[in-house]
Amino acid sequence: MKINHLLSNITPTQIDIEIHGLCLIAANVQAGDVFVALQGQMTHGIEYVNQAIENGCVAVLLDSQDMECAVPAIRIDNLSEHLPALATTFYNNAAKVKIIGVTGTNGKTSVACFISQLLDMLAVKNGLIGTLGISQSEQQSKQTTPDILTLYRTLDGYFKGNINTAVLEVSSHGIDQNRTAGLSITHAVFTNLTQDHLDYHRDFNAYQGVKARLFSRSSVVSAIFNRDDDYYLDFLKAAKGKKNTDFGLGDFEDIRPTEQGFLVTLKAYVFEVPFLGEFNLLNVLAAFNTLKAFGFDDEKVIPLLHKLTPPPGRMQKINNRLVWVDYAHTPDAIENAITTLRQHYPEHNIRVVFGCGGNRDKDKRAKMGKIASKLANTLILTNDNPRNEDPRAIIDDILSGIDDSYEVDITLDRQLAIETAVITLDENECLLIVGKGHETTQTFKDKTIKSNDKDIVLAAIIEGIRLKKLKNKQ
């Protein structure tokens, strides 16, 4: 497609350069792309034009002042408002992909992964888009819900590759910023609603209202709800007129905790769910009911549920040790994670390593500190992603929710905190490391370093074995 055809309904131009794609992020620009240089939260902005040119962009669309650069630059007033039109014009196959959209505060990644796994087992080719990245595609995104151009480009590629179904994590930011405009989200799934992202949304009611918008979309045919959540009825109202399905722990005829997970009975089928936490039982039910809404019968889906595997960094047990890494970064999530270990290992002490991210919802820090100190036997507070904030100030915010009589270890170096916790772990203790889960980097004000909690644990286990052998020789 030539750029004058792309812009024919937006702004006339005599430029007839052939273009191969549209991109909002300079670092992701490919040869032949048009770089869309927005101002605002969805993109890096105009200062990255030169980087986009270096990566091979052939033209730039601007929504700010005119500028001279090595490629044609076209100014379009209110450019962000034209993104859906640009996306649908260039990537006209994207809307042909049937999308299962999963939203909620916690559980989006697990539920989306479970749905995708079940579709795979049932021979339905699908793409998975969310916190863990973009499957079946060379596209990259650091956002839970990618920007609209990345999303359209990915879905267009899916369709051309004969993938007609996608599972998408839909964040509140993604809904609020209209990143899914024009797409065919036919099934919408609600996991739960608790406090998060109040640094972005005006208040909790605004956060809830944005989430609920997913279920009132005209493209949504079927909605799947967690009826055990306090906000179930509110979300059900948003889906008025849809074909609605709900689920809850009461759907199981029997639930028996084991050290590895749960032995459950569902519709007379007895099987093991091979991971911890009642919240994961809800995640499994969310996936099961979504597949039913998608047209599959019980007898096709239920026998597959024991084969599900948790995504990286979600109550992930490391190397058969009593050490877990989890992405929990909200008050509700950390409570669920610690309570889970209490349920499955009632005779063990629980040690928790955690921190809170900088430049994010500050109000939840004291709440997380209070919950963790009430439920865990010992705490080690450390850095999460401090970003532009003072790491010690973040720790102080967490400490404000912890009683002065409760002893807390503070080790700002996350690697050292995890290593120490692993090496000194007693036989009667469980260790829970929360906050970053699958993440492979740690972000500070002036740098980003490689850091993965699982890798640190594995290295610490090896070091612990070495130290133990050394001690025995002495």
Image (cartoon, rainbow, N blue to C red):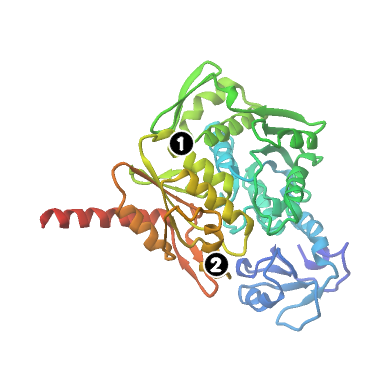
Give residue 127's position: percent from left, percent from top.
Answer: 60, 45
Where 305 sits versus 378, above or below?
above
- State the image coordinates of residue 467 (x, y, percent, origin top left): 21, 57
Q: Which element carries disc 2, helix, strand or loop?
A: helix
Q: Earlier in the sequence, mark 2 or mark 1?
A: 1
Of the pair 232 and 61, the residue shown nearer to us = 232
Instruction: Single out the residue that lies furthest toward the front.
Output: 405
Which residue is situated farthest in the left direction here?
474
Position of 88 with respect to 119 (left or right) is right
Count of picture labels? 2
Farthest-out residue, bottom: 68
Amino acid type of disc 1? Leu
> At which x and y percent is residue 344?
42, 34
Task: Identify which amino acid the numbered label 2 is placed on.
Answer: Ala
Mark 1 surroundings within 10 Å by alpha-carbon count, few (fewer than 14), some (14 through 19), many (20 or more):
many
Looking at the image, residue 413 lies above or below residue 351: below
Residue 246 seen by the camera = yes
Q: Residues within 10 Å of mark 2 (few under 14, many from 20)?
A: few
Q: Residue at label 1?
A: 276
Q: Which residue is mark 2?
A: 393
